[in-house]
Image (cartoon, helix red, strand yellow):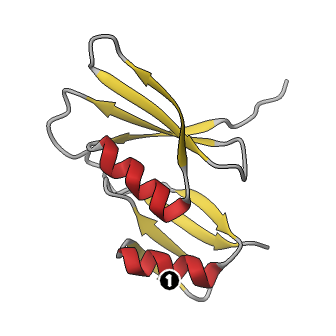
Amino acid sequence: MKFKMIHENYNVFDLDKSKAFYKEALGLEEKSRITAEDGSFIIIYLGNDESDFLLELTWLRDMDRPYNLGDCEFHLAFETDDMEKSHELHEKMGCICYENPSMGIYFIKDPDGYWIEIVPAK
């Protein structure tokens, strides 16, 4: 038996703001969308040509407040082929939330507070 990772889900408070963030910060584009007939939810899948893995963003109409992410002890990681340019972009965007120079990595935070690790290509 084999298992293949296909997507990770983040629930988001403002779908348009999150979609714009992921496009600017990581070059992710909308690949597909599911909209409930009654308008109660929208799910979009974001991805790029670097892998088949998708980020699923779920918006719930009845959510009336930003999500509480607790201690945020989880994250998604992205590898970049140009750490310097990536860092410059994320610094300009003001979304860097933690840096670990000794490991050569840093983290950015999306509009809902999810952390994304940025690592250099090996």
Q: Residue at x 69, y 37 (%)?
A: 5
Quarter-wise, where is residue 103 in the image? bottom right
For the C terminus, which image quadrant? bottom right
Give the residue number, with chain letter if any, for mark 1. 88
Quarter-wise, where is residue 109 in the image? bottom left
Residue pushed farthest left? Answer: 64
39 relative to 34 in the view: left or right: left
Name which residue type carries label 1: Glu
Q: Position of residue 49 (x, y in %)?
A: 70, 49
70 relative to 20 in the view: left or right: left
Q: Position of residue 16 (x, y in %)?
A: 32, 45
For the N terminus, which image quadrant? top right
Q: Position of residue 105 (x, y in %)?
A: 59, 77
Residue pushed farthest bottom? Answer: 102
Quarter-wise, where is residue 113 in the image? bottom left
For residue 104, say whether it is visible: no
For residue 54, say whether it is visible: yes
Circle 1 sits in a helix, a strand or a loop, which is it? helix
Q: Residue at x 54, y 61 (%)?
A: 26
Residue pushed farthest top? Answer: 37
Q: Residue at x 67, y 65 (%)?
A: 79
Q: Residue at x 40, y 57 (%)?
A: 21
- Placement of 95 over or under 39, stated as above or below: below
**How would you rate the neighbour count of disc 1 (Cα within 10 Å): few for under 14, some for 14-19, many for 20 or more?**
few
